[in-house]
Image (cartoon, grey):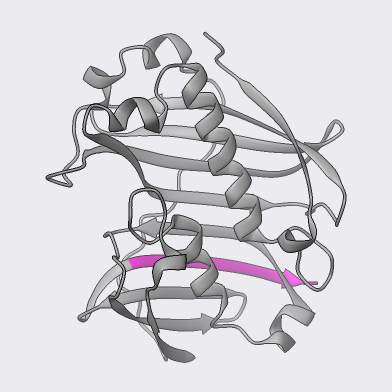
């Protein structure tokens, strides 16, 4: 089995910001794509799981950006499984421009029963993880973020629609990120870039549901959470630097 999987990507027009750089959600799309490609290679693809009434869901992600590629630029991404327990598995990603590292990320995943929506034992469903896991040099895991204190910088409501959904019929993980980024205005993006992002996916959000998005800012750190009926379904932390 292939323990480390590599794939090359090209930055397309719809994946860039107004600086012509790959956006954080587009980078996340590439992560999820290569994760799926590698999962198929090792017999743990979502199509295989769904035939058993199971599916992958992501519980958290940590992204670190060094130098995002520009429009039409090409970069290579590598991924491997770096850890697993009874109910979770960690998958790491590193992106390169030639031999130069430009970004890295870690992610934590669960397998859930599609009917009960409850986790199942990963190590029982996928015994091959023992063979492909590369624990040496595992990247830092995402922060488990608690309820945020402090003054609210912005608050907005958002109704989840069909275009927000993924194959599991709930809010797509990168759409959480896109909605969080929508709390910033154009002037902010003209002056800042993101260096580190921690994402906590707490609960599923379904089509038609209305969420409240709240951002609190303290210097270069921005905490954004999404609430449904007053309860957090998503928390995130963004660290910024000058553009």
Vertical comparison of 60 with 119: above or below: below
Specify whether 243 is left or right of 167: right
Which residue occupies 73% across, 62% down? 14
Q: Is residue 223 visible?
A: yes
Specify whether 135 is left or right of 89: right
Q: How many marks?
A: 0
Q: Position of residue 37 (x, y in %)?
A: 55, 29
State the residue in front, 71 or 155: 71
- The residue at the far left in this view is 116
Which residue occupies 44% across, 56% down? 173
State the residue in front, 191 or 5: 5
User: Which span is picked out in magenta?
Assistant: 234-243
Vertical comparison of 3 with 26: above or below: above
Dominant SS of magenta comes to strand
Q: Position of residue 48 (x, y in %)?
A: 35, 25
Q: Position of residue 169 (x, y in %)?
A: 33, 55
Residue 195 picture quarter: bottom right
Specify whether 175 is left or right of 229: right
Which residue occupies 62% across, 75% down? 220
Residue 208 picture quarter: bottom left
Vertical comparison of 21 with 167: above or below: below
State the residue in front, 97 or 9: 9
Vertical comparison of 143 with 126: above or below: below
Q: Position of residue 63 (x, y in %)?
A: 58, 51
Magenta residue check for 146: no
- Quadrant position of the C terminus in the picture: bottom right
Specify whether 196 is left or right of 193: left
Q: Is residue 105 visible?
A: no
Magenta residue check for 242: yes
Residue 189 picture quarter: bottom right
């Amino acid at each position: 089995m292939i323990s480390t999987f590599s794939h090359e990507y090209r930055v397309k027009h719809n994946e860039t910001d107004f600086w012509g750089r790959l956006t954080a959600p587009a980078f996340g799309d590439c992560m999820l794509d290569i994760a799926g490609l590698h999962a198929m290679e090792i017999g743990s693809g979502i199509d295989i799981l769904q035939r058993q009434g199971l599916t992958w869901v992501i519980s958290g992600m940590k992204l670190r950006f060094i130098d995002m590629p520009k429009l039409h630029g090409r970069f290579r991404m590598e991924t491997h499984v770096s850890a697993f327990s009874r109910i979770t598995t960690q998958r790491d990603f590193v992106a390169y421009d030639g031999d130069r590292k430009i970004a890295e990320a870690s992610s934590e995943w669960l397998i859930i029963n599609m009917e009960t929506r409850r986790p199942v034992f990963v190590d029982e469903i996928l015994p091959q993880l023992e063979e492909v896991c590369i624990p040496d040099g595992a990247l830092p895991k995402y922060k488990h973020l608690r309820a945020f204190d402090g003054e609210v910088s912005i608050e907005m409501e958002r109704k989840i629609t069909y275009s927000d959904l993924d194959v599991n019929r709930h809010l797509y993980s990168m759409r959480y990120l896109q909605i969080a980024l929508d709390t910033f205005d154009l002037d902010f993006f003209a002056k800042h870039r993101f260096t580190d992002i921690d994402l906590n996916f707490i609960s599923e959000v379904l089509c038609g549901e209305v969420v409240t998005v709240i951002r609190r800012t303290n210097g270069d750190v921005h905490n954004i959470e999404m609430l449904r009926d007053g309860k957090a379904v998503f928390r995130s932390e963004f660290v910024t630097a000058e553009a």
